[in-house]
Image (cartoon, rainbow, N blue to C red):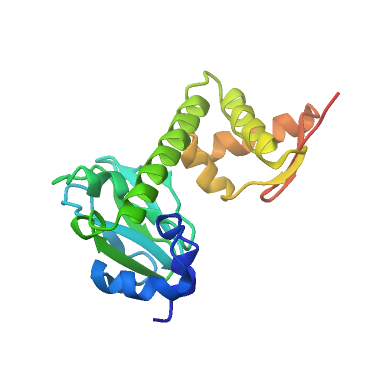
Amino acid sequence: MEYIKKLTECPLFEGISEAKVESVLRRLNPKIRKYKKGEYIVVAGNPVTDIFILLQGSVQLIIEDISGSYSLIAQPLPGESFFEVSATLNLQKTPVSCYAKADSLVMTIPFKNIQSNPVITKNLILTLAHKSYKAFAQLEHVSRRSVRKKILSYLSAKKNQAGKNEFVIPISQTDLADYLFISRTALTRELMSMKKDNLISYNGRKFTIKTN
């Protein structure tokens, strides 16, 4: 199968050698589908019983309101899984939508089939724990009272992850605004103000936190 190597990079398949992945997949009965840019992969309000793995491209998980505005929940990278919680809970009406930000290739695996594999089941538990931690981190950022404090909370976390003052954030500034639940205009204005106050410097996704 063409995407075996990409699956070995997926945390769900950790501990399963590349030589064994194909035989494991035959028992999991996965499906692979292509999505065009802008096409919805999952629409909120529908049931989700499969776990999804991004093989190629770019997708975003969002929560939309009746006005058409949305909040960014997650942006999986190729080789990462998503909709684990919805599939595990067998949600008949998931609150989250997912669309292809670029032409994408996605694998789906029925959750009931995953339960038969102890290695993948263990990895799923670890994945859920890791994502719960990331959700808590996002809550910590967005709960700050001012736009500046939200931004500083996020940038400080990325600085600590990188272990240095210079780092590259994994998402665009537009997506960062959605992630922090603020408008792009407010984010741009505050970044410029923080740069003027000599707190940070930045160029696109590359940031430097200044130290006194």
* Residue 165 percent across, percent down from the top left: 77, 37
**Residue 65 left/right relative to 55:** left
* Residue 156 percent across, percent down from the top left: 66, 31
User: Which residue appears farthest toward the left when viewing the image?
Assistant: 92
Instruction: Count numbered badges in the picture.
Output: 0
Q: Nearer the viewer, residue 155 or 199?
A: 155
User: Which residue appears farthest toward the right when viewing the image?
Assistant: 212
Above or below, 153 relative to 131: above
Could you tell me which quadrant the C terminus lies in?
top right
Work out whether residue 126 can be spotted: yes
- At 31% from the left edge and 53% from the top edge, which residue is drawn? 118
- At 72% from the left edge and 30% from the top edge, which residue is drawn? 194
| Snapshot quadrant of residue 135 | top left
- At 66% from the left edge and 49% from the top edge, which residue is drawn? 205
Work out whether residue 71 can be spotted: no
Above or below, 156 relative to 13: above
- At 24% from the left edge and 42% from the top edge, which residue is drawn? 95
* Residue 137 percent across, percent down from the top left: 50, 31
User: Which residue appears farthest toward the top when viewing the image?
Assistant: 145
| Snapshot quadrant of residue 110 | bottom left
Above or below, 117 relative to 146: below
Could you tell me which quadrant the N terminus lies in?
bottom left
